[in-house]
Every structure is written in C-alpha cells, then in structure tokens.
Amino acid sequence: DIVVTQSPDSLAVSLGERATIHCKSSQSVFYSSNNKDYLGWYQQKPGQPPKLLIYWASTRESGVPDRFSGSGYGTDFTLTINSLQAEDVAIYYCQQYHSPPFTFGGGTRVEI
Amino acid sequence: QVQLVESGGTVVQPGSSLRVSCAASGFTFSSFALHWVRQAPGKGLEWVAVISFDGSSQFYSDSVKGRFTVARDNSKNTLSLELNSLRGEDTAIYYCARAGPHIALDSWGQGTPVIVSS
C-alpha cells in the first residue's frame, strides 16, 4: 500500500502571506502511460465535506482561485496558497489515486 | 448540478449490520466510478472503498475488507455500502464521492453519521 505523509500537521500564516504544505508518498504516483501524477489536494472547512482543489498534482479544479497551486512529481508534492485569505482557514489533505487503497495524508490545519 | 445525498446512518450496537446509501443526480451515473470515504470524530479522512462505473470491480481498505460491501444500481442512480460486524472504530461520518474524469474525487455528499456504541 502507498503511504501518504503530510507536513506540517498545522501552520499559522498571516493574512496575505504564503502557506506551503508538503505531501510525500512512499511510492511514485506517476503513470508514464499518460505522463500524470495521480495526486489530488482537498480543502475541508468545519462541518463541510471536502472540496477538490487540485488534481494531477498541479491542475486547478474549475472555480478554484489561482492563489492555490500544486507542484511536484513522483513522490514529493507541494500545495501553495499565495496571499492567504481568511476564508482559506481549513484543513488540507492530499490523496494518491494511483493504486488502491487510495490513501489520504493525515491533513494539515491552516490557521491565521 | 451534481448532487450526492447519503442516508441510512444511525446508532447501532457493536457486531451489528447497517446499510448506508447515496442517491445521485445531475450527471450520467453509470459513467463514473464512486467512492466511500469516512471521517471519525475529530480525525482525518480515511478512504474506504471504490466501485467501478459498471460495478464490475471493487476495492477496499484493509480496515474494512471482508466486512463492508460496496454496490451500485445504475438503473436507480444509487450507491450503497453494506457494513457488517461493526466495531467502535467504524464510528464516523460516511461520505460518498464521485471520481471525476481526472479520477480525483470531484463531488462529495454531505455525509451520513454512523455511530457504533452499546
């Protein structure tokens, strides 16, 4: 099974500053057949279901503000939130969907 | 728009069984794989199971394999999860989610709570 590890567990960022979250998989989630990394990022606010932000490691879902960006390949990935807004306070999860079980990272809580 | 509505969550005793369901609308149900993801109180997301678009294949997490069964009825646009031999650690909100064209989970229901307690 692919183990997905996120860091840090939590971070506090000032409004307008940058937040950086890391995600590491125990095996590569890259498929050479289509040149894609099978890694997604989700945002979950209190009392709400998760919301997809990023898929294929770096492609923003429709409607997601461009201050959210994903990068990385293979086993190491990053979610960056530029110019943090108050509404970005949430827990962020990465998930590998390369092979079942489609494991999530433990989550990173972002606070102001 | 895509809508997923879970139901069936309740309080049950350890060792008992339960079926939770997910009613889908707003998209071509039979074209998409569907997942169950759960979240224990105050904890992170745990992937539970997936079923292919036509129901021909299913995969489970090790923690539920052999106890839970995922199924779908493409004629009724309904996804279900049969939970057997329930344990306290199965207490969670159970979400159904659609795997989008990019395979990531692009639409989620609001979840249904399952509480296993004596």
Image (spheres, coloured by chain):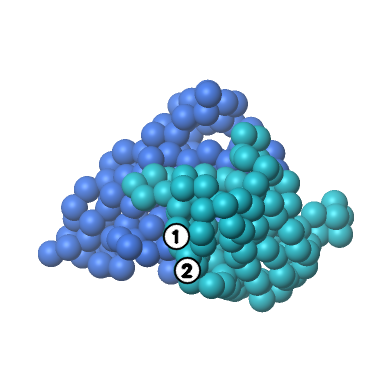
Q: Where is residue A16 in the image (x, y as percent from the top left)?
A: 57, 52
Q: How many marks?
A: 2
Residue in front for this viewpoint, A22 or A56: A22
Which numbered dot is residue A10? 2
Q: Which chain carries label 2?
A: A
Could you tell me which quadrant the C terminus of chain B lies in? Answer: bottom left
The vertical placement of B32 against A67, above or below, is above
Residue at screen point 27% across, 46% down: B9
Looking at the image, residue A48 lies above or below residue A105: above
Res. A88 in view: yes
Q: Which mark is residue A111?
A: 1
What type is the residue that disc 1 sits on? Glu
The CA span between labels 1 and 2 is 8 Å
Of residues B93 and B10, which is closer to you in this image?
A: B93
Q: Which mark is residue A48?
A: none
Give the chain ID for the cyan colour.
A
